[in-house]
Image (tube, rainbow, N blue to C red):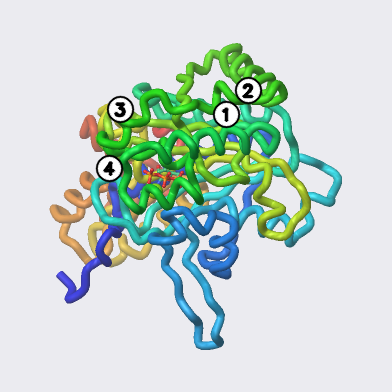
């Protein structure tokens, strides 16, 4: 035990559990890599103003959850609370949108930071894999992203997740709806904070989790009834494409993101085994975001999936990922001369692509064999002086216990044959 502990709201990924996190990130990334998305990596911190504008001054993320700092040089920075604003900033900065190939499709994976009240599924440091398709308005693109997330979850073996889908309208139909909603909300019994929200971010009130608020929202005007023809048509196409590909979804007229630059398609992936932190991922169209951060008009769509909550969802469903053992072969030397020779054999196996480990620390045979069994290896390579004098090593199958002598200079071939 050290004097120090991981900071509140954070946790370490350590073996063997850390292997599951790597596998989840890989599984989410795999369908993106097969679909034209290129990998992007941005700094862990950005100018605070990028998030203030790009995530929105009125959001919880910006008002309450951001880790901000002033550098010695006087720069105002924030640890990134989410990925979209940074990725769009990077794409604009590199002029990717001018290369003549829209949409620009990017994926990312990394750590995000929010000053939240820590609880199961809600941390101050967490991990996301995300995807953004920048610069095209096409219902097939929205559908593509939803299908890719769906397929990623399925490939992990998850079943009990649901896709919630809604349309937020656009600059043509949203203003009139917003005004109608504000009228309705002003007639309700609400606390001061929520009243303030009616002015800046009225759609967010629909998302209020408190029952006293939800009860009053019965009969509130719903965006779905106020969509213009173009938005209705667009949304219908997204729905048809999902249905055609066998991706089930639920229409959720109350699913909102209150900010003006979120338009049309919005969706959330929820898992029913996670209690109140049920969102495993979310996303949607953000047609106005580029202009918000000083870029040209670039209609875009994207999502971010939470790795931590996806791992919790796997646990909730009792899904065990089929993770290959980290080590296939474990070498156990008997004596000093054997140590030197087997060390070389270990290097040779590794260079041939076989995951191999070695009994370090001058252990006795018993302790070394115990280490071999604990490593999860299928084979042990054991050698003493008499073996080496004959130019052989003992290859032991750690499951069956069966042991045979094989020539030292044919070890790679013998091991490969046995591992298949
Ligand atoms: P919530 O409503 O649960 O706070 P959110 O709307 O803030 O979620 P997004 O900003 O859409 O979440 O982030 C996408 C995903 O990242 C979420 O669906 C979730 O899986 C994950 N996520 C967000 N915040 C946290 C956190 N503090 N700890 C762990 N995972 C998180
Ligand atoms: Mg949140």
Residue hosting label 2? 235
Residue 387 is at least partly visible in this image: no
* Near-viewer residue (294 or 346): 294
Looking at the image, which residue is at 65% across and 32% down? 173
* Near-viewer residue (301 or 225): 225
**SS for callout 3:** loop
Whole-Å distance between the Cαs marked 4 and 3? 34 Å
Q: Where is residue 241 in the image (x, y as percent from the top left)?
A: 63, 17
Whole-Å distance between the Cαs marked 1 and 2? 7 Å
Q: Where is residue 190 in the image (x, y as percent from the top left)?
A: 32, 44
Circles 1, 2 touching at the beta carbon (< 8 Å)? yes
What number is the disc on residue 376?
A: 4
Q: How many circles with numbers are drawn on the protein? A: 4
Q: Quadrant of residue 212?
A: top left
Whole-Å distance between the Cαs marked 4 and 1? 50 Å
Circles 3, 2 touching at the beta carbon (< 8 Å)? no
Q: Earlier in the sequence, mark 4 or mark 3?
A: 3
Q: In which quarter of the image is residue 260?
A: top right
Q: In this view, does 414 lie to the left or right of 93?
A: left
Q: Residues within 10 Å of mark 2 (few under 14, many from 20)?
A: many
Residue hosting label 3? 272
Residue hosting label 1? 167
Looking at the image, which residue is at 56% across and 21% down? 225
**SS for callout 4:** loop
């Amino acid at each position: 035990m050290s004097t120090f502990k991981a900071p509140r709201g954070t946790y370490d990924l350590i073996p063997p559990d850390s292997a599951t996190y790597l596998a989840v990130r890989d599984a989410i990334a795999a369908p993106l890599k097969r679909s034209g998305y290129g990998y992007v990596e941005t700094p862990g911190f950005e100018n605070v103003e990028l998030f203030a504008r790009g995530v929105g001054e009125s959001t919880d993320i910006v008002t309450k959850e951001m880790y901000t700092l002033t550098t010695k040089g006087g720069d105002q920075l924030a640890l990134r609370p989410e990925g979209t604003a940074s990725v769009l900033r990077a794409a604009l900065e590199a002029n990717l949108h001018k290369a003549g190939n829209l949409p620009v499709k990017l994926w990312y994976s990394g750590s995000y930071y929010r000053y939240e009240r820590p609880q199961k599924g809600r941390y101050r440091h967490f991990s996301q894999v995300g995807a953004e398709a920048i610069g095209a308005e096409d219902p097939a693109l929205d559908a593509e992203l939803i299908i890719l997330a769906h397929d990623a979850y399925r490939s992990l073996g998850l079943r009990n997740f649901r896709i919630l889908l809604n349309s937020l309208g656009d600059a043509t139909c949203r203003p009139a709806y917003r005004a109608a909603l504000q009228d309705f909300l002003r007639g309700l019994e609400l606390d001061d904070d929520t009243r303030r929200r009616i002015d800046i971010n009225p759609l967010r009130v629909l998302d209020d989790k408190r029952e006293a608020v939800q009860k009053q929202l019965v009969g509130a005007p719903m965006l779905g009834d106020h969509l213009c023809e173009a938005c209705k048509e667009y949304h219908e196409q997204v729905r048809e494409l999902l249905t055609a590909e066998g991706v089930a979804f639920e229409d959720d007229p109350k699913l909102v993101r209150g900010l003006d630059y979120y338009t049309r398609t919005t969706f959330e992936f929820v898992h029913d085994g996670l209690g109140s932190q049920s969102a495993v991922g979310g996303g949607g169209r953000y047609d106005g975001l580029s202009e918000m951060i000083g870029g040209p008009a670039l209609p875009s769509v994207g999502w971010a999936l939470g790795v931590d909550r996806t791992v919790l969802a796997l646990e909730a469903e009792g899904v065990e990922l089929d993770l290959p053992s980290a080590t296939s072969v474990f070498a156990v030397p008997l004596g000093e001369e054997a140590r030197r020779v087997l060390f070389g054999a270990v290097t040779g196996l590794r260079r041939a692509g076989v995951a191999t480990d070695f009994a370090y620390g001058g252990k006795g045979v018993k302790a070394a064999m115990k280490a071999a069994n604990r490593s999860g290896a299928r084979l042990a390579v054991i050698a003493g002086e008499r073996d080496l004098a004959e130019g052989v090593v003992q290859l032991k199958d750690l499951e069956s216990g069966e042991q045979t002598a094989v020539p030292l200079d044919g070890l790679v071939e013998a091991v490969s044959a046995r591992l298949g």
